[in-house]
Amino acid sequence: MGSAFAELFEARWTLLISAGLSLVFTLIYIKFMDWCAVWLSWLSVILVFASLCGSGVYALVYRNDRIATNASYEDTSEAGWIMFYACVSLIAAGIYLLVMVCSFNSLRVAIAVIETAADYFADTKRIIFVPLLYFTIALLAFAAWVSALICVASIGPITVESVESQTKDIVWDS
């Protein structure tokens, strides 16, 4: 164990600089989310729809391109599976669009909640220390567990006597 601690000691500046950089990057990310949370939320909704439509259209274009170069390709099972994939993707895009249109107000409320959460994190930066506190507590609990394990293991081999021999020694008062 001495060599492991020696290596940690030698790498202490690297570890400390990494911890400092992760703190700085976390603060930059929180500020970025404060500025762009609404736009990123809407962008993710649009990208899901675009990816469903795009994959369906790409599958159709790919299938038609293969059929144009090889007329017998249309009768293969691969062409059938590509057509099935294209139909499933486009139907999923239609269902996604229908759900988004029908629940547009709920979507706006959800994005407003995301914006509020981003504002809260930007205003209360000390919240990033909560996971560090729990991580420290978990490390201390783990260290206590390992210490208890070492103490129990250092007792030596544990043998179990039969239960019958223990009950014979007990005198029962009536």
Image (cartoon, rainbow, N blue to C red):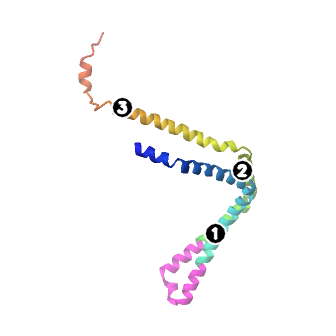
Membership of 84 in magenta stretch: yes
Q: Position of residue 76 (x, y in %)?
A: 48, 82
For label 2, the SS is: helix
Q: Mark 3 or mark 1, which is nearer the start of the sequence?
A: 1
Kindly identify the amino acid type of the residue bearing the numbered disc 3.
Val
Please give the residue where the numbered disc 3 appears in the rendered image: 152
Q: Could you tell me which quadrant the C terminus lies in?
A: top left
In front: label 1 or label 2: 2
Relative depth, front residue between 3 and 82: 3
**Above or below 82: residue 163:** above
In front: label 2 or label 3: 3
Q: Which residues are magenta?
A: 60-87
Kindly identify the amino acid type of the residue bearing the numbered disc 2.
Ala
Q: Could you tell me which quadrant the N terminus lies in?
A: top left
For label 1, the SS is: helix
In the rendered image, which quarter is residue 130 located in?
top right
